[in-house]
Structures are given as C-alpha cells and as structure tokens.
Image: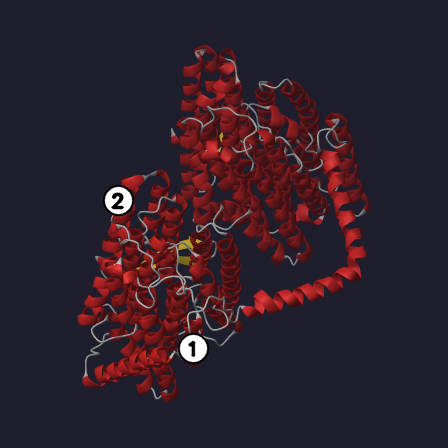
Amino acid sequence: MIDHLPILQVVVPLLGAPLCILVRNPRAVGLFALLVSTVTLLISCTLLQQVLLNGTLVYALGGWAAPWGIEYRIDYLNSYLLLLVSAMGAIVLVASQSSIGGELPRNRHMLFYTAYLLCLTGLLGILCTGDAFNVFVFLEISSLSSYTLISLGNDRRALTASYQYLIMGTIGATFIIIGVGLMYMMTGTLNMYDLAQRLPEVHNSKTVLSAIGFFIVGVCLKLALFPLHLWLPNAYAFAPSIATAFLAATSTKVAIYVLIRFIFSVVGPVFANTVLPLQEIFVVLGVSGIFATSISAIYQLNIKRLFAYSSVAQIGYMILALAIGTPLGLTATLLHLFNHALMKAALFLAIGGVVYRVGSAQLSHFAGLGRQMPWTMAAIVAGGLSLIGVPLTVGFVSKWYLVLALLENGWWPLTILVLISSLLAVIYVWRIVEWVYFSSPRIMIDEVKDPPLGQLVPIYVLVIANFYLGIDTSLTVGVSKKAAEMLFGGVF
Amino acid sequence: MWSIELPAFVPFFAAALLALVTRGALRSVLMLAVVALSGLHLWFLDGEVLVNLQFLEYELIPYRVDELSIVFGYVFHIAAFVSILFALHVKDTMQHVCALLYAGSAVGALFAGDLLSLFVFWEILAVSSVFLVWARRTERAYQSGMRYLIIQVMSGVILLGGLLLHVEQSGSLEFGFIGTDHLGGWLILLAFGIKGAFPLLHTWLTDAYPEATPTGTVFLSAFTTKTAIYTLARGYPGTELLIYVGATMACFPIFYAVIQNDLRRVLSYSLINQLGFMVCGIGIGTALAINGAVSHAFVHIIYKSLLFMSMGAVLYRTGKIKATDIGGLYKTMPKTAVLCIIGAASISAFPLFSGFVAKSMIMAAAIKEGYNVVWLALLLASAGVLKHAGIQIPYFAFFAHDSGIRTSEPPKNMLLAMTIAAFLCLAIGIYPKMLYRLLPFATDFNPYDLTHVLAQTQLLFFAMLAFVWLNLQGIYPPEKAAINLDAEWFYRRFLRRLVEKISVWVDGFDSDLRIRVEDRINWIITYFAQRHYPTGKGAVIRPTGNMVMYIAILLAAYLWLLLSFPH
C-alpha cells in the first residue's frame, strides 16, 4: 500500500470527482469532497514522512520502466508542495460547506465540487509526475477545471473573466507543449530525468534553446508573472470566494514549482545560470512587477481584486528570489511559496466570510465592519500584517531570507527596493483597516455578524499557522533548505 | 496545564482575552483568579527553568527563570494582583485589558532569556501602557500620552539597534551581562536608561504618570521602571557610571518635588528618587549592593503603589489632586489617611517599615566600598524622601488647611487593595528574613543593629523637625498653583521655539520649491488614481490582446538576449 502512495495521491481525487456527480445531494456532496480531500491530505503527510526518512521515491506507472513508461518521482521539493496543496485543498473545503451555499444555487454545488476535485487532481498530478508530457496533461486538467470554477461565480462578469482566462491559459499551454515537443524532437524522450541526461548533448542547438524559451514563457503566463498577469485579477475577483481562496493558495504556486523543476532538474542550474538570459529577465520583471502591481493594489475598490494584485506582487518576490540563483535565494522562493499560500488562503477565506454575510467584496461595504464582524476583521488584519512582513508572522520569515539572499550577493539596490515595496503593502493593508475600523457603516444591515463557526475555524487555523510557523520555522525552513540543496546538488 | 514550562506571561495575556469577553462580577473573579494562580504557579516552581525555541538561525529563550528574575516575578505578581483589585470598580473594558497586557508584558520581559524576546515585550509594554494614560480621556492626557509613547517606542528602537550590534559583536542573543565595552552595549544601556528614567531621560515619567487615570497610575508606577531596573541589574551590574547616575537621580528630584502642587507629580518625582537608590546599588555591583537594589525594588513597588493608591482614592472621591485644592480629608477618609501614612512611613524608611530593611543595605554597601561622597548624597536623598513623600503627601492631602471638602471612604475594593499593600509593608519591615530569603545572593544582613537604627532615626527626626520649623516660620515653599517644567523645558519650550524659528525661515526660503514638489507628487497620485479607478484608462483593459502582445515581446526579448549575447 505504502509503495503505491505516489499514484494514490492523484487517483483518489481523480476518482472522487465523477463520484460527486453521482452523489447529487448538495449537502452530502460537500461532505464527500471534504472526505476525499482529507484522504489526499493524509496521503501527502505520509509521503513527506517517507521522503524525509528514505529519500526520493520512484514509482513506475503500470510497472513500465522509466524511459518508456511514465514515472512518478517524489523528492523533498514536491513532497513539500504536495503537503501544501492538499492541506489547502482540505482546509478550504471545510469552509466551503457553509460558504458555498451563500454564493451558488443548490443545483450547482455538485458541479462546483466536481471541478474542485478535478482541479486538485491536476495540481497534485503536476507535482507528482516525472514526465514532461504528463505535466502538460495535468496542467490542462487543472486549468480547464479552474475555468469552470471561475465561471460559476455569481457575478455575470465571471463568465468573461473565465473566458479570457481560457484564451490566455490556452496560449500559455500551447507554448508549453511547443517547448516539450521541440525537446522531444531533439532528444527522443519525455521523462524529465532522461531529458536531463540527454539535453547536454544538444545544448548548443538553437532548437533546444528556443524550446526552453517557449516552455518558460508559457509557464510564466501560468504563474502570472508581470506583465503576463492580466488574466488573474478578474478571475480572482469574480470567482466564488472559495474558489478564489483555493486557486490563490495553490495554482500559481504549482506553476512556480513547474518553473523550478524545469530549470533545476531538466535544464540544470549551471546551464540555466550561465547560458540562458533568465537572471536579467526575472530580475527586471520581478521588481517591476512588485512595484506596478502593488501600486495597482492600492487603488482597487474591490477587496478581492486588491489582494489579487497583491498576489501578483508576491509572485514578483518569489521570482526575484529565484533569479538570485543561489541556494539561499531558492530557499527564499520556496519559503515564500509556502508562506504566501498560508496568508492568501486566510485572507480570501475571511473575505469569503464577508461575502457570505454582506454579499459584496466592495471596499466601501467593509465600512464599520470592525464592530459587526470582529473575528473576521481581526483575521484580515492578521493576514495583512503577515503580508507586510511584520516580525513573528510567516511573512517576516520569507522576507528575511529574501533580504539575506540579496545581501549575500551584494545586491544592495534591490534590497532597498524590496524594503520600500513593503511600504506599499502597508498602504494597501492600511486602506482596508481604515475602512473597517475608522468609518461608520454605510449600509445598515442589522443581521451582519461573524460567519458561522464552520468558516471561522478554518480561517483561524490558517491565521494561527501564520503566526506559529512565523515563530517555529523548523518545518518550513528545514524542508526548503533541504530541497534547495538537493536541487543545486543536481540530484533528482 | 501546570507544566512548569508554561511561561508566566501566558496567563496574563489569557486573562486579558477573558476580560475582553466577560463582564461584571465574573470578570473580576476571573482576572484576580488568573493572576493569583499564576503567582502560585511561580511560587511552587522548583529551581531554574529554561525554554528554548529555534527562530531562524538563532536560539531564543522566551522563558527563563533564575534567582534574579524570580524575585521580580513574585513582586510583579503581587503588584498586579493589588492593582487589579484596586481597579475592580472601573467599568472601562479597555483599561482592564490594557492593564493585563501591560502587566503580562512586564512579566514577559522579566523572564525573557534573550534580547530579541526582551525587545518584543519591551515594545508591547510601551504600547499597552499608553492606553492607561489615554484612558483619562482628556486633551492633556492625550498629549502627554503621545509624548510618552514616542519616547517609549524610541527606547525600543534604540534597544533593537543596540542588540543588533551586540549580536554582531558577541554572536549570541542571550541576555546576560552586556557591559559597556562596545557601541551596542552603550545603546542598550541608553534604551534601559530611558525606561529607567535616568536624569534628563526621565521627563516622560513626570509628564505622563500624573495624567493617567487614578487606577492606571498604580499599574504604571509598578512595572515600567522596575522592568528597567531588572534589566540593568542583569546587563550592567558593577558599571561604575551607574553609581553616579544613581546618586544624581536620588538627589535632583527632591528639589523639584518640593515645588510641585500636583500630589501625584510629587510621587512621580519621588519615584525617580527611589530608582536612584536602586541604580546606585546596581552600579556598586557587590553581592550586598545587588541584594539591596533587588530588595529595594521589591519593597518599593509595594509602598509606592500604596501611596499612588491612596492618592488615586483621593482623586477618585474628590476629583482633585492639587495640594492647593485639598486638605483636611482625614475627617472623612480616616482609613485612607492611616493607610497613606503607613506607605509614607515605609518610603521614608522608618524602622519597622519595609523601606528601612532595603535602603540600609544599599547604604551599607556604599560605605563598605568606600564611596563616601555617594553615601552622603544618598543620606541627603533619604532626608529628602522623608520630607517630600513621607510628610508632604499625607500632610497636604489629609491635614494642612481644611479645604472644606466632605466626602467618604473609597469603595471596598480600593480599601482592601490598600490594606493588603499596607500589611505587606509592615510584615516585611517587622520580619525582613521573609524578604531576604528570596534574594539572589545568600545574606545574613541584619538591618536592626544599633548603628543603622540610630542613624536612621536621628535623620528622620531632624528632618521632621526642620519641616515643622520651616512650616511655622512660613519659609517652606507655599502650595502654589503652577506648572513646573524641568528638563522637559528643553523640548516643550526651547525646541518648539527653535523649530518655529527655523521653520519660518525655511518656509520663506523654499516655499516655492515645496509647492512644486507637492504638485509633482499630487500629479503622480492623481495620475495613478485616474489610471486605476474604474473610469480610468488602466481599468479598461483588453487583457487578451495585451497579453498576446506581451507574450510576443517576452519571447522576442528572450531569444534576442540569448542569441545576440552568447555567453
């Protein structure tokens, strides 16, 4: 049984998805999805434990050996992210039991949960697999199901947002498949491990160099690197709140994983740092992304859009840290990946609570909610503090490592820019605080109070995680460091 | 639950949370019970405790109990209990919550085993305490609270700077002996000094404490400065500079105290004078002197809060606290008057009262180490204490001219709190062994030998004689209604005038430039606003088209960089 865990990780939610349609009853289908995601979470916990004990796990699908068959490889990097994604998947589903009722008509619940589990399958599949084409397949599964999730949103604009995401996402996927195709043409293999062995022979051909270019640009679109982020704000703003919380916490993170995996395990860090012009591109886009989107966030009137822009800015930090090209920089990327998921999941779930009670995510409708929804607003403030990077929160830990990595390379000007950009985060978080605590309520709804416990509990689990992991960093820093060392050591 | 590793500040913070959601009698019982249980928990603690925590690359020690910190821990619990009891009748939730957070962070700072944890509690201490000043809800209280907050936060920032330098120097975050052989040590000393009300750095104390609420001042007087005393005793024992700083602190407030009209301001000055004794003891640094400083801090917290409580009771009942406005209250508040006199006798170090058993240790240490001048200064300061705190306070409040105010005794909880404090004053004074057993260094010091008792009694009687004589002759500075400024004159008057002058000059010089810069900034803000608000250009996006263009540009840039600049 333990031997089959890598495939069970993907198969359990994959089988759960169609079963959701059979269940039909709105209440039961939610509980069923929660059950499935909990099992997935347990599997990923066991996998991480196994990897920490025994090192990399290799699983050949259907018993077919590697270069011909599909192979799943679980190491420090992806077991860490498997845990993150499945944990977020499960926690968000706890909140969705009550939250989704406020946003979707009852007959759509099963559609929502089916798409949700499919999306989870896709994301976990991308993380597990060691096969380049398989990555594309799972990417499509997760993308198609997330288009569905977004289009389920209450607002009619959700449809256009989803449609635009579909067009752009497809362009990105096309670029990825072009890259994979060209590499297959040159090497005759799709297995990542095998590709890593064979690519050096043909490194100098322009085909391979352009193949890498296509792949990376495609992935950058998926991870919403500035200026390829245009699909993200609308998609996050108009999707059902639960879907936003799930996607914000997982989907861009998995795309960053694909980028890291490709650069380090397929292309190899040495080649990527010396030949490819990635550092220049990533530094410029990372820093300009941080500033441009943080400034955009300041002026948003819809709080979901505000945090969507802030997400793009945070991706800028991760890419900047990745561009440093040292183990410490990669550690910072991985840390921020994990920590940012914690913050954004907490924030979007809390906003989901407000949408559930007030029916809107407009900033002006938050006026005076500090009195009426004290717990929810406290969670938003806590998440905001973490986003700014206040000490004792996870945000501080990841910014700390980013600054350390920048200083280690002697990149003083960038360090200063990063610190200044934190002030922009202070501004947009403060704008919320001002509305919430210092304005008198504009709409008088007597019934407004904190969302039911079913939503508050997951929110506070995440908020506490934000603080706990900000103080006791042994899990996140420990695993990130090990993963970074492994990737730089060239062991796969 | 009763794990010995449960840090002592946790119950306080938990109680603050409970106080937030409960009301009435339940809240009273909960607050008192939690603090009492936490105190018992500490009392039954056996030996030393050390809790480690890994934070980034550093090892933090958020909870460390040893001989030095535990004494302060006991007395902080006593002070917290008494002050909470004294404040029970208050209906203001904010005050209760902030007071508990404040006491909790003081306890946290005591048991912080590393500088980073200390810094965190240091800042919570500053922020939570200012609400006790603001809770008075007057414009004056707001202003002086603001000044208080700025100075306190500055102390925290200096501490942070100092600790970074110190860590770089020593490679460890542990909070042990720091010393003044490097810049980091000096900065940390400065930060401690601000909280400890060193001369010229003391103005926040005499500015803010008299403005706080009647109950708030009782909390304030117990924790902030004594936390500083503890940190000094931990980080800088035997630093010679501190002896002279301490002697100055003990002496200069006497003169200011005499001319004050607000009786709580008199007590604030006398607080600094008392701190002077402790700082002096820390500076001397021998086992006897440190014992003296610690035991002085111990008894001081109790009698000082007793005095502040009695004045708080007067303020609560009459609404007045100026010496010129009150007087003759003994007729209607006899119990308060008696309790106040017990506090006054303790602070003046009458034999059989708690002040005596502590102060004589520091004096004995000073003479033993040959600091004769310092000894004389401390002697002068002792006489001064008797005069301004021991006599002036009870005399002007309860006797002196009859103001005609007829009031009644304060509520029961206030009386009970004061009675507990007074009982402890007497108990420690009569049976000092009880206190000496707790001290960090073993001691067989006996305060009740002939010379100590005789010298102190002589001093007291002559000082009293002088007061009576001066008063009869009419030479004693009369009670006057005025605001006295001391070193704070520097920033409240001089600095302000200077700033006004300079700003007028600068204003004329560069107003043109500033207008232009402002226009520019406004233009940038409006530009972004116009772009991003829903009607703006930036909001009307054609995502698909733009994105395809960006993809093309990005791919082209990648290929161009790759192919035209081969590595």
The amino acid on which the numbered mark 2 sits, given as a three-letter code, is Val
Q: Answer left or right for A238 relative to B206.
A: right
What element does badge 1 sit on?
A: helix
Q: Is B357 rendered above or below residue A111? A: below
Q: Position of residue B548 (x, y in %)?
A: 76, 29
Graded by Cα atoms within 10 Å as few (under 14), some (14 to 19) or many (20 or more), the crowding at tag 2 reads few
Residue A424 visible at all: yes
Q: Which residue does the numbered mark 2 point to in the structure image? A: B29
Q: Is B209 rendered above or below residue A111? A: below
Q: Answer left or right for B536 relative to A333.
A: right
Pick the front one: B382 or A389? B382
Q: Position of residue B234 (x, y in %)?
A: 38, 69
Ranked by sequence position, the earlier of labels 1 and 2 is: 2
What element does badge 2 sit on?
A: helix
Pick the front one: A267 or A304? A304
Q: Residue at x 43, y 55 (%)?
A: B129
Residue B172 visible at all: no
Count of residue discs: 2
Location of residue B45 by image quarter = bottom left
Q: Residue at x 30, y 48 (%)?
A: B88
Chain under label 1? B
Mark 1, mark 2: which one is toward the viewer?
2
Chain under label 2? B
Q: Is A46 rendered above or below residue B56? A: above
Question: Residue B242: which numbered mark, if any?
Answer: 1
Q: Position of residue B409 (x, y in %)?
A: 27, 54
The amino acid on which the numbered mark 1 sits, given as a three-letter code, is Leu
Q: Position of residue A263 (x, y in %)?
A: 63, 41
How far is the residue under mark 1 from the one under mark 2?
Answer: 43 Å
